[in-house]
Image (cartoon, rainbow, N blue to C red):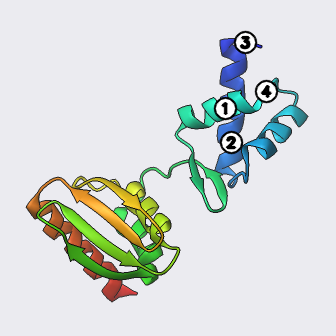
Amino acid sequence: MPHTNSEQSERRATIRELLKNGSVETQQSLVSVLKSLGLAVTQSSVSRDLRDLGAIKTAAGYELPRSGHDGEVELARVATLLRDTTPAGSHLLVIKTAIGAAQRVALAFDRSDWPEIVGNIGGDDTVFVATSSASGQKHLISKIERAKAAR
């Protein structure tokens, strides 16, 4: 069932408000809340809305990406999870974390919005971070070491 642009805009505005007030555990729970508010919605429309809003799936559920946060603050939130940082070539860092914490650390790097980070991949206890340059790699190592020292 196609939705009009105004229905879509209203639905997305409502989703944005719900996510600002806290994470939503599943897409199905979001569908239920939106239906209870009288909005025409399906799981597939919610999935598209979340993607288009840039929502992030975390262990707690779906959240909006944080904007305007200082990268140092983001890294400080996960500093106790950091174990070891090892360069792998001039543009790659291998960061060991506590078991099960790599995706939280990777998300903190994503949210930091640091220009030296091109991208990262978080596994279970390892994060691979690609940097834009060798000097960017050195700057990032310094930032990580400061965060670890401050904990």
Q: Which residue is mark 2?
A: 17
Decide if residue 111 is on the left or right side of residue 54: left
The tag earlier along the polypeptide, 3 or 1, is 3
Question: Pointer 3 and pointer 4: residues touching (CB < 8 Å)?
Answer: no
Question: Pointer 1 and pointer 2: residues touching (CB < 8 Å)?
Answer: yes
The tag earlier along the polypeptide, 3 or 2, is 3
Instruction: Give the residue type that dot 1 points to.
Output: Ala
Q: CA distance from mark 1 to mark 2?
A: 6 Å
Question: Regarding mark 1 in the picture, which secondary structure is present there?
Answer: helix
Q: Which mark is residue 41?
A: 4
Quarter of image, res 14: top right
The tag earlier along the polypeptide, 4 or 1, is 1
Question: Regarding mark 4 in the picture, which secondary structure is present there?
Answer: loop
Instruction: Give the residue type that dot 4 points to.
Output: Val
Q: CA distance from mark 3 to mark 4?
A: 10 Å
Of the two numbered discs 3 and 1 in the rendering, the one whose residue sits closer to the viewer: 3
Q: Which residue is mark 3?
A: 2
Question: Regarding mark 2 in the picture, which secondary structure is present there?
Answer: helix
Q: CA distance from mark 4 to mark 1?
A: 13 Å
The tag earlier along the polypeptide, 3 or 4, is 3
Q: Position of residue 101 (x, y in %)?
A: 50, 73
